[in-house]
Each structure stands twice: as C-alpha cells, then as structure tokens.
Amino acid sequence: MRAVFGLVLLVGMGLAGFAVYMVNGYVAQTQVALDQERQKAAAAVPTVEVYAVNRAIAYGETITKEDVVVIAYAEPHLPEGVFMTEEDLFPEGEEELRSVRRPMEALEPILAVKVTEPGDVAGITSLLSPGMRAFTITVDVQSGVSGFLRPGDRVDVYWSGDLRTAGKNESQNVTQLIKGSVELIAVDQTADGNRNGAAIARTVTVQVSPEDVAALAQAQATGDLSLSLVGAGDATVLGGISIDQRTLLGVPEEVVEVVEEVVVEVEAKKCFVMERDAEGKRVPTDIEIPCTN
C-alpha cells in the first residue's frame, strides 16, 4: 500500500508540475500577444470619416447620394478640400447637385477642386481660378506637340517672328519664351482630362492672368506661337530665353565701321581795291570787288 501511495503521490506531483509549466507558457504567450497588440495600437494612425465615390465617375457627371460612401482616411495625410458631412457635400439636397470637373476612381475621396459648386455645370468657367482668364491659342501638329496635349497639362509658350531694330531698316528672326508653365484647361472643345490617345488639336485654351492675355494676343497677332509640354511635377521657373538666327548658327556679329563726318567751315575769300600810299606801297581800300583767279 505504501508503495502504491508513493507512486500515486509522484504521479500527482508530476502532473501538477506539468500543469504549472503549461499555465506559465500560456500566460507568457498571452503577455507577448498583449504587448504586440499594445504596440500596434500605439503605432496605429488616427483616421477620420470622409465622403468618397463608390464607383468610377467621368467628367461632367453629377454626383448623387447613391454615388457616395463614407470611408476612413488617415488624418495626418488628409488632403485639402475633403467633405466630412453630408450637409457640406449636398447643401441643397437633391435639388442642386455637384458636377465632376475631374474624373475620379472608386473609393477616391471627393475633393472640392474636383467638383463644381452645387447646381453648376462642369465647363470652362468652373475650371478658372479667381482672377484668371481663358485664352485660346491656334495650334497644329507641330506647334501642338503632335497631339499629346490634354486638359490639365502645363506648357511653355514660345513666340517666333521678325523683330525690327529701332532706328534701323532691318529685322531679325527671333524665338522667345513668352509664358512658362501655363495650364491647359481645354483642348479643342473639350475640358475632359481623361481623354486617351493622341489627337491633333486645332486649338488649346489656357488659363492666364489678364496681363498675359494681352501679351499672348499681341504675340499671336505678330508671329507664330509654339507649345512645349512641361513634365509632371516639374516646378522649374524659366525666364529670359531668346535666340535669333545668328546666335543659332554661331555667326559672329558684323563689325560696322563708323566714319565720323567732319564739317570744316571755310571763310569766303574777299577782294578789295588796292592803292599806293605815300611811300609807294600797295594797301587795300574799303572798296570790295569780285575776286579773280
């Protein structure tokens, strides 16, 4: 009996030790998992609810309440112009809806710059910034960058023509940068920036200041305008770019010899009647007579 009791005691102690081992392991795993969750919670980015479209929407479409959905967006990276409430997005309800000025993909946040004011129709006037004006430039396959221009692109505008020199009856052919990094708001009669492929445009409409409108109008009336496409994200400020034919070909400037004209005044020759004095010398009188050789 004593042997059996001792055996049972040993088995019980072994089971108890194994149970304690298992409990300690479970507690350790639970603590590790809890620490990991705490670290994830500490590193989590706070979010806010904003309105987004629930489908791909093209230029010119109106946005209804059926086209939007509320999504969570990272607050530190929140773009400017988002809509957080239904009252902001639909201030007039279903009576006056906003139109899409720039195409949006599904679950893309709705930004104020991508939609019109309630009741407005997407068009050129809705794309103009305050104080800016629309100006149309005539282009062809060469001056229009082979048809690769789209609304929303930025271009440099160059003028080519004959420049007359003041005070001289001569001119030289010059190409000069008129305006840099100008935004295109329409190509031909469309302002849809989602157009695909190359199409030869006949006109492009740019967004410029009233002063630039006058400069571009004068440039277009006195010469030819050419466009140069600016790369996406390029913020380089250009200025003072001008080249003429002589500079292009590396021909040195002609040295013109200037001959100074010197005017010398010659006093007219006068002749008088000569008489002899008491000593017999010839002296002139006050009587002037024509000179003879």
Image (tube, helix red, strand yellow):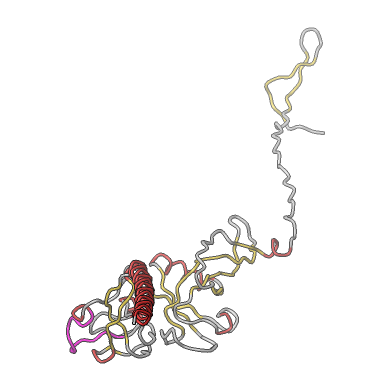
Side of 67 where 162 appears, left or right: right
**Residue 111 or residue 100, whichever sits in front:** 111
Instruction: Locate residue 178 relative to residue 116 in the image: left or right.
Output: right
The quadrant of the picture occupied by the C terminus is top right
Query: Can you tell which quarter of the image residue 145 is in?
Result: bottom right
Q: Which residue is at a point 57% across and 78% down the rendered structure image? A: 143
Residue 278 against residue 291 in the figure, above or below:
above
**Residue furthest front as drawn:** 1
- Find residue 19 and report its horizontal and vertical position in percent: 35, 77
Q: Position of residue 271 (x, y in %)?
A: 74, 27
Magenta residues (range): 89-99
Residue at image coords 30%, 76%: 112
Image position, residue 43 (x, y; %)? 36, 67
Vertical placement of residue 38 versus 97, above or below: above
Report which quarter residue 259 is drawn in: top right
| Residue 79 in view in this figure | no
Per the picture, the main secondary structure of the magenta-coloured stretch is loop
Asked if residue 226 lies in the magenta stretch, the reply is no
- Tell me the residue at 70%/31% (across/down): 267
Position of 153 with respect to 81 (left or right) is right
Residue 273 is left or right of residue 101, and the answer is: right
Q: On screen, 2 above or below 236?
A: below
Identify the residue shown where x is 36% and y is 75%. 13
Image quarter in which the N terminus is found: bottom left
Front in this rendered view, residue 114 or 251:
114
